[in-house]
Image (cartoon, rainbow, N blue to C red):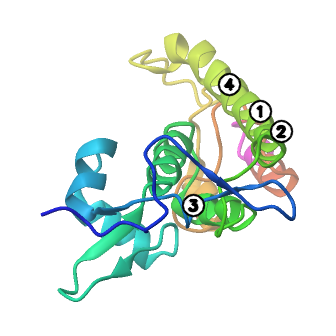
Amino acid sequence: MTAPASTNSRPGKTARNPADGRASARPADPLLPISEVARRSGVAASALRYYESMGLIASSRQGSSRRYYPRSTLRRVAFIIFAQKIGYSLEDIGRQLARLPTDTLPTNQDWRRLSRDWKQHVTQRIEELQRLNMDLDHCIGCGCLSLKHCKLANPDDLVGRGGPGARRWLGAPYPKELKEKLEKAGCA
């Protein structure tokens, strides 16, 4: 079954708004059923529904209550996938997508604006991974058992008192209060 398409829809053509010259996602975009978006993007239909529930993408419903997406959704899904690969959470991705127009295709200027933020994020991730890479040889299976020099030292679970989950990167400086406690315990 093919999805209904807009009457002015022509493959390969993008309508332009005469007022500002922006590419319009609606008039020229044929609507694609969820199965087609899943096939073309490589993302499961369940993930697409989840993205929609989070407001990352939007669909319209036809008489049969099936979801149909504008073809421009493929670009948004690609954006989501790539952003996840470089370490962004879906919440972060939602904030970034909220900065893009929803009724038109993003312009090159829109993408450049996001690109600046991404470059900063990627640079930070590279620095974190380089620190981790430098410490891997020393920490994995070293068996040093030296609380004075081990970067994993955590007497009395002092780091855990900061809350659940990971609290610090290897090689990152300790917060002042924790450093003082570790020094007092003879571990820093």
Q: Which residues are magenta?
A: 182-187
Query: In the image, residue 174 lies at what x, y percent?
Result: 78, 44
- Per the image, label 4 sits on a secondary structure element best described as helix
Q: Earlier along the polypeptide chain: callout 2 or callout 3?
A: 2
CB atoms at circles 4 and 3 under 8 Å apart?
Answer: no
Checking the image for residue 160, the label placed there is: 3
Q: Is residue 91 above or below residue 73?
A: below
- Quadrant housing the C terminus: top right
Q: Mark 1 highlights which residue?
A: 119
2 or 3: mark nearer the eye:
2
Q: Mark 4 highlights which residue?
A: 126
**Separation of residues labelled 2 and 1 (CA atoms):** 5 Å
CB atoms at circles 4 and 2 under 8 Å apart?
Answer: no
Residue closer to the observer: 132 or 59: 59
Query: In the image, residue 90 lies at what x, y percent?
Result: 52, 61
Q: Earlier along the polypeptide chain: callout 3 or callout 1?
A: 1
Left or right: residue 123 compared with residue 1: right
Left or right: residue 63 compared with residue 153: left
Residue closer to the observer: 77 or 118: 77
Q: Mark 2 highlights which residue?
A: 116
Q: Magenta span has 3?
A: no
Query: In the image, residue 25 lies at what x, y percent?
Result: 58, 60
**Separation of residues labelled 3 and 1 (CA atoms):** 32 Å
Q: Earlier along the polypeptide chain: callout 1 or callout 4?
A: 1
Tag 1: amino acid: Lys
Tag 3: amino acid: Gly
- Quadrant housing the N terminus: bottom left
**Separation of residues labelled 1 and 4 (CA atoms):** 10 Å
Q: Earlier along the polypeptide chain: callout 4 or callout 2?
A: 2
Q: Earlier along the polypeptide chain: callout 4 or callout 3?
A: 4
